[in-house]
């Protein structure tokens, strides 16, 4: 199974080379993938799967598109 993983803002440098076709195993969660690519869990603020907000314990399916965002400030 493969997913697309999109790492935004300060996480961009953690984006794997195969981000558009990232291999996962059956039953893996967002948390598993975030840890694999080296993003500290305590820095993750928002996660989307296929454009819908998701929790870190959500299981992933083949073809999912995952977006991972840090806390972002501005003003």
Image (cartoon, rainbow, N blue to C red):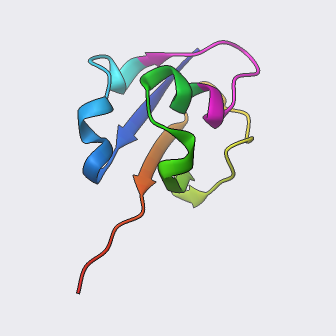
Q: Nearer the viewer, residue 42 or 3?
A: 42
Does 42 appear above or below 3? below
**Quarter containing the C terminus:** bottom left
Q: Is residue 58 above or below residue 54?
A: above
Q: Residue at x 62, y 36 (%)?
A: 30
Looking at the image, which residue sits at the far bottom? Answer: 75
Write down the quadrant of residue 61 in the picture: top right
41 left or right of 69 in image: right
Residue 63 seen in render: no
Point out the image quarter for the N terminus. top right
- Say if the magenta span includes residue 33: no
Horizontal arrangement in the rendering, residue 22 relative to residue 47 (left or right): left
Question: In the depicted view, which residue is nearer to us: 47 or 61?
Answer: 47
Q: Which residues are magenta?
A: 22-32
| 49 up-or-down from 74: above or below | above
Q: Is residue 15 visible?
A: yes
Residue drawn at point x = 73 percent, y = 41 percent: 58
46 vs 18, nearest the viewer: 46
Is residue 23 in the magenta section?
yes
Q: What residue is shown at x 41% (from left), y 55% (from top)?
A: 70
Left or right position of 67 against 72: right
Residue 31 position, x and y percent, is 64, 34
């Amino acid at each position: 199974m493969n997913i697309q993983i999109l790492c935004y803002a300060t996480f961009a440098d953690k984006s794997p080379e195969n981000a558009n076709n990232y291999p996962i195993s059956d039953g893996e969660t967002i948390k598993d993938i975030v840890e694999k690519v080296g993003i500290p869990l305590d820095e993750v603020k928002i996660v989307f799967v296929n454009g819908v907000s998701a929790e870190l314990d959500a299981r992933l399916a083949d073809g999912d598109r995952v977006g991972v965002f840090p806390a972002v400030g501005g003003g």
